[in-house]
Image: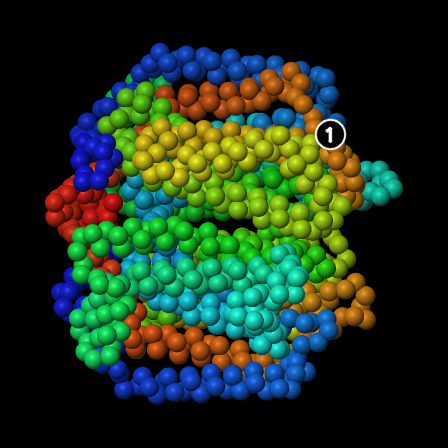
Amino acid sequence: MQEGRVLPARQINRDLLGSILYSPRWFWGAVAVLGLIVMGGFAAAGLMINQGMGVTGLNRPVMWGFFIVNFVFWIGISHAGVMLSAILRLSKAEWRRPATRAAEVLTVFSLMTAMLMPLIHTGRPWRLVYWIYTIPFIPYDFARGIWPNIRSPLVWDPSAVYTYLTSSILFVLVALIPDLAVLRDRTTGLPHKIYTVLAMGWQGNPRQWKLQIIAGVLLSALILPVFVSVHSIVSWDFGMAIAVKPWHSTIFAPYFVVGAVHSGVSAVAFVMIILRWIYGWQDYIRHEHIDALGRLLIVVATGWFYFFVMEVIFGFYGREADEIAFRDFQINQPPWNLWFIFFVGLTYFLPVAMWLASSWRRNLWLMSIACISVNIGMWLERFLIIIPALAEKQLFTFTWYTYAPSAVEITIVAATFALVSMLMLLFARVLPLIPLYDVKEGDILKTEIQIGRRTVPATFRED
Amino acid sequence: MAESAHHSSDMWVFPRSAEVTEFVTRKTFTRPGPVTLAMALTGVLLVLGIIGFVMKAAQHGFDDHTPWGYYAAMFSFVFMVTSTGPLAAAAFRITKSHWRRPLSRVSEIFGILGIFNILLFIPLAIVLPTLNNPDVGHHELALRRSIWFEGPIGSPLWWDLFGVIFVGINALALLWLSAVPDMAEAYEKATGFRRSLYGMLAGFWKGTKRQWLIHKAGMALLGAWYFMLLIFVHFIISSDYGQSMIPGWKDAIFPVVYSLSGFQSALGLILIIMFILRRFGGYQEYIGISPFWSASKLLLAFSLLWCYHMFSFGITYWYGRTELEQNVLKYLLFGSYGGVFAGNFFFSFVMPFLVLLWNPVRKSDWGPALAGASALIGAFLFNIRIFVGSFNAGNVYGEFITEVPPPVYPGLSDILIVIGGIGGAAFIYLLATRIIPIISLWEIKEGLLYQKVDTFIRGRYLVLAKPE
């Protein structure tokens, strides 16, 4: 550990603010390409709204398709932020420092993207406005004298996700304040004015640092239950639906949470590799950091696999006809069986086999492949939970059907990936994606211990 | 003793390296009065337990499983705690947590109880009903629900037995491997039986670089293997002796809750033992506050996770509202065993949470030990609730639990069995501490190389080396 050298603060500022102060030549080209894909997605959504849900592959009984799969996927990705930032901050893991900001920002953008999915899935998004407000500040249900069904996912999900989104934004903002002050002091004109407002008078005096640290720790502790509740509640959208037997499982909540952490941390590792490559941050995102993420991922992946095995075993355990029919469909019937093999292989066996070797964890190409593999696998997991269960929801075989996504759905889903990538790039254009003060603090805490004839890297504990 | 800007002077302790072996071996080889008393007391409890077992066997035999509910609960409690104990050392070693050093051996010594667990398990293996229904009646299944489905050879009996045996052997191997350098070092100071035992078990150890490398790799591999094996055995024991005995109860999260109860209670017991060693055993120089502080955060996390998983089970069943789900909830949570569940919930979650919520309490030796004691009581009630419940839930070949059975209260033999099993485990543990140093000599000495207190700006802080 501690492979990097201690860099002067001036150089850290120059390197990490480079993406803001000096835009690379490729930047706007990349944003334009991603923007075009996003526009394509909006156009597809517009077409769907104009033509109706018939342009999608949704049917009876498969009324939840790509949009809901993608919703669960992006909610899952959002779990990276808290896992890396809050838990590693509380556990004082030194290697967290360069990863926290990117993880937190990915949380915010993936949550925003996730919430687009149910909105699009409704087919008539403006009805959401009716659902929330009819006239300014008067809720719809209140205005009509009826009350929302608090047992409905339509109440659970937005409550949980918006609480998480609000706390995540707060989390990012609190951690950003010292860096915003650095930017304030290095810009002129309008950007200077904006950074001045955002920096909230930060001078870096001991009292401000103390408050900032306390706020960070408190928010870390407070956000953890929110983080767990969000994906649990998303899982209960399925788990409480007793009409769909395979979904009514007690293990769904932790299974979803662990799966979300698995895909989220993999996504962060991949984002860090990309950032290192495009911005040349080799001194900050080092092999040791990717290696540590790889080791963490072995544990998370194995935890996920345990929950997965429990879910499958207890699916068969009841020996109930509709459950067995679903499992048969999911595991035996082509092409689902092929997807199932891909899903398990890509989510667990391939990446974990790669992460077991230290040299492979430190190879950024292989690590990228492993992380992408996990995310493809996790997307497939949600697909295989939702679609086959709905396709064979009823006991009567004449009500069984299948599902194939339409071009509209594929375009919208592809656009969400472009949207998150574009938002991350735009964020990097205005705010640092690696926390300057955190990196500097890590450097200050570095020291050495003499053991016999060897000098071993060491760290001052923060507490 | 080290002082810091933020912590009391005994947060981190740094005993003199040259005196570690002398001190710890002297402590191991002498038997102070309180330890002798505790051994005598637990020995008597063990004898009472044997008497209770004989009474139960003479009264009911082994043909019917229902009278053995309290025995199953006692076995599960002892097994859950003692088999999970060694995991603490293995896991914290893999994560390279320096604070683990004083608690490593405390947790590894639980490995010696692997043999005791195997012996306790044998009667349970005999009373477990077969998967095939010998006499299929109306509304009965020909093959009862279990994790073994169509029943591969020897299931569930032999698989469970082999599981418990493998866990026991693996825990013993972990203890032996970890204690080899200490036994080799203590050999010179030992006499009589101890000397010949150390010579036999660790005579080959010279402490060469190659031996240390093999030792280190072996510990990591064995630890990782033990973790996976233990989770598997928790799964089969909790399913075969708990879930599958209640007709129709299908709960994928139950094995997870069982393992979590194991983690929580084992860590709780380790903290209690550490507290006793520090306060009354004369190990203040070896056990600082740091391991209590760090382990208490984990204990808090386990308590929260236990509650979360129980909630996940409860809300799914409550929302399902099928007759079966309602009956399971009434039986295990709110009706027949409602009082036991209330106690279980209080001791496994409410009390540890309220105690460990406060940082000053976490930064003491008594706070984590108190929470640990609570977790231990909670785990005991958990096992009573589940296993007495499952052994008395009616026809195991039934399709579903259609009626909520009444609770079963313990008889004299049950009480003797329970106190005897727990007392026996404590007796064997105490006996083992007279032979194997309860503080890992090599880990403490290694820790002294990797840690020091140094000045940083105006305060004194701990410095941790990161050699890898």
Q: Nearer the viewer, residue A120 or A266?
A: A120
Residue B388 to residue A256: above or below: above
Q: Determine which residue is flagged by label 1.
A: B406
Residue B354 in the figure: left or right of residue A153: left
Q: Secondary structure at mark 1?
A: loop
Residue B367 in the figure: left or right of residue B132: left
Image coordinates of residue B82 in percent, x first then y, are 48, 32
Image quadrant containing the N terminus of chain A: bottom left
The residue under the point 33% across, 63% down is: A173
Q: Residues within 10 Å of mark 1 (few under 14, many from 20)?
A: few
Image coordinates of residue B181 in percent, x first then y, are 30, 34
The residue under the point 24% across, 48% down is: A462
Using the rendered image of the protein, determine whether residue A293 is visible from the camera's viewpoint.
no
Image quadrant containing the C terminus of chain A: top left
The residue under the point 49% across, 77% down is: A416
Image coordinates of residue A270 in percent, x first then y, are 38, 69
Image coordinates of residue B269 in percent, x first then y, are 43, 30
Residue B68 to residue A247: above or below: above
Q: Nearer the viewer, residue B314 or A132?
A: A132
Q: How is the image coloured?
A: rainbow
Total residue callouts = 1
The chain ID associated with circle 1 is B
Using the rendered image of the protein, determine whether residue B166 is visible from the camera's viewpoint.
yes
The residue under the point 43% across, 44% down is: B301
Residue A86 in the figure: left or right of residue B246: left
